[in-house]
Amino acid sequence: MRMVSFLLLVTLAGCAGKKEPEAEKKVTDKASPLYDAAFWKTWSDGSAELTSYELKYPRYGAKRDGTAVAIFVTETFANTLRVKSDPGLRAKSDEFPVMKLNLVEDFQTGIYDYNLMLQSFIALESVNGRPAGVATKIAWSSQEWCGNLFKQALLDDGDVRFMSHSYFDGEGDQELTEKSPAPAVLTEDALMLWARGMAWPAMKEGETREVPVLMALQAARFKNGPRVWGTAKLARNKSAGVKLPSGEFDVDEYTAALSDGRSRTFLVEKAAPHRVVVYSSSDGILARMIRSERMKYWELNKPEGVEELKKLGLPKLR
C-alpha cells in the first residue's frame, strides 16, 4: 500500500511539473495589411487571378521580347515543410493561410530561350515570430540552355535559411543561415504583392517609408555568402492614367529605391482588385499588361484547355 501511495505521489508530481506546449506568440505590426471580409470575399472563391504581360527583358547587352504571367491565389501552407498543405494530411496547428504569387517570365536570347519563375508566399496571419504580411518563403529558378539555377529563402523566427543549387561554378549546393534585421521585413521578391496592398508594409497615398529589405534571390550572388540585406525607400504616389491595349487605367505609382542602386516601379490600378498593370526596373525590365482573367487554371490541363490561352492573349507553345 505504501509503495502504491509513493508511486502515485511521484506520478502526480511528475504531471504537475509538465507544462502544456505554449501557443506560438503572435506578433503584430501597425503596417500589416488588413485581410478583412472584403479581402476574403475576393480571394476565397477557389479561383486564381492570371494576368499576362508583354515583356522587355535585358540580357546579354540587348532587350529581349517575351511574355510574363502573374498568378495570384490563396493557399493553405504547412509550416513544418513550408509547402502547400494537402487536405487532411496535416494537423490544423501546422497550417496557416498564404497569398501566393507565381511570376513566370519567358524570353528568347538568340538561339535559346530563358524561362524564369519566381514564387513568393505571404503569410496572411502572424507565424514564426513575424507579423501578418511578411513573406514566409521565396523561391526563384531559371532554366536555359546553359543550365539550371534554384534558390530559396525560408523566413523563420529571427533567421532566414537560404539554399542554392546551380550549374554555375561557385553557386551550387549551398545552405546558409543569416540573422534577420527585424521581425517585420520586406522582400524584393514580394514587391508586386506589396504594391497591391497584400504584403507589409501597407501604405497610404503620398506616404514614404524606409524599411529593411531582403534583396531579390535573382540579384544575389551566393559565391561569398548571401549578403543580401539592404534597405528600400518606398513611396506611393498618385499617377496619371495609363493607356494600354487592354484599356485605360487610373493608377497609383509604387516605387522602391534599393540601397544597392537599383529601383523598381509598379503602376497599380486604383480600383479593386488593384492589379499591377505595368512593372519596370531601373536595369531595363518593362512589362505591360495584356489581359487578366480569374480561373481555376489547374483544372485546364486537358488538350482542349490550351484554348483558354486566348483569354490571356497568349500564343500556344511551339
Image: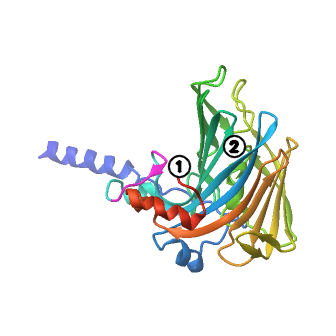
- Kind of residue indicated by mark 2: Ser
Indicate the position of residue 74 as horizontal and vertical percent values: 52, 63
Range drawn in magenta: 81-87
Residue that mark 2 sits on: 180
Dominant secondary structure (helix, strand or loop) of the stretch shown in magenta: loop
Residue under circle 1? 317
Residue pictured at 63% horizontal, 38% vertical: 113
Location of residue 142 in the rendering, given as x and y in whole percent from the top left corner: 61, 37
Amino acid, disc 1: Leu
Judging depth in this view, the residue of 264 and 257 nearest the camera is 264
Q: Position of residue 180 (x, y in %)?
A: 69, 43
Q: Can residue 200 be seen in this view?
A: no
Q: Position of residue 94 (x, y in %)?
A: 43, 54
Depth check, front residue: 209 or 296: 296
Q: Residue at x 55, y 76 (%)?
A: 42
Residue 99 visible in the snapshot: yes
